[in-house]
Amino acid sequence: SAVISQKPSRDICQRGTSLTIQCQVDSQVTMMFWYRQQPGQSLTLIATANQGSEATYESGFVIDKFPISRPNLTFSTLTVSNMSPEDSSIYLCSVEKQGNEQFFGPGTRLTVL
Amino acid sequence: QQQVKQSPQSLIVQKGGISIINCAYENTAFDYFPWYQQFPGKGPALLIAIRPDVSEKKEGRFTISFNKSAKQFSLHIMDSQPGDSATYFCAASMEDSSYKLIFGSGTRLLVRP
């Protein structure tokens, strides 16, 4: 498995501001992903965080709104930019280990007022 | 074609009973089918997973049944316990898409004492 930490665990932000979420894993991994889980809903993939290159975004998600950094094989950040109340969600990072198993961090619970 | 359909939306089972959650998919290119368990305020935890070359996989009280021809798979929780009360998500992924997970809509399980 993998030990994954996320910071912050939760935050309350004002409309129009930005928040950067950090994801740290205890070992080097090739694949890191960012997901969004809206209240009471399932998980939706935002993007794949690629080390040394630009992130790969899923349909409906754009770099200007969700810029992602992946400076090394154990760390990634997701920024939620120019936030609105619709961005209130849980944001989760995950990593893929051998055998295609994906392990998730504890999540960052974001509330936008 | 990328969807994974999950049912039921919610499930109530008596302690000691069998909980059964079903998922169906359309894309025959999917080749990895995990189940995740999520408790409130936590990230999803990988419970058990199966590949289409086997019809069943068992780990403790949890069993995945896989029907390749019907494009369906299910999670069976034997001897269900109140501690199993959580939300369960099925998912699917494929090598061609870098194993990005497509999640079902989730099933909220309540096991009554």
Image (cartoon, helix red, strand yellow):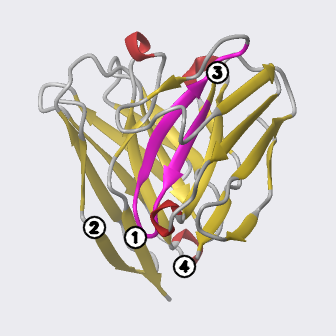
Residue occupied by mark 4: B82
Q: Main secondary structure of the magenta part?
A: strand
Provide the secondary structure element on which disc 4 rests: helix
The quarter of the image holding the N terminus of chain A is: top right
Tell me the magenta residue range. Answer: A33-51
Number of the front mark, 4 or 2: 2
Mark 4 to mark 2 CA distance (whole Å): 18 Å
Residue B100 x, y percent position in the rendering: 46, 27
Instruction: Identify the residue shown where x is 67% and y is 40%.
Output: A78
Pointer 1 or 4: first along the chain: 4
Amino acid type, callout 4: Pro
Amino acid type, callout 3: Met
Pointers 2 and 3 in contact (C-beta within 8 Å): no
Q: Are marks 1 and 3 on the same chain?
A: no
Pointers 3 and 4 in contact (C-beta within 8 Å): no
Q: Which of B53 and A36 is in front in this view?
A: A36
Provide the secondary structure element on which disc 3 rests: loop
Outermost residue on the right side: it is A26
Residue B33 x, y percent position in the rendering: 40, 32
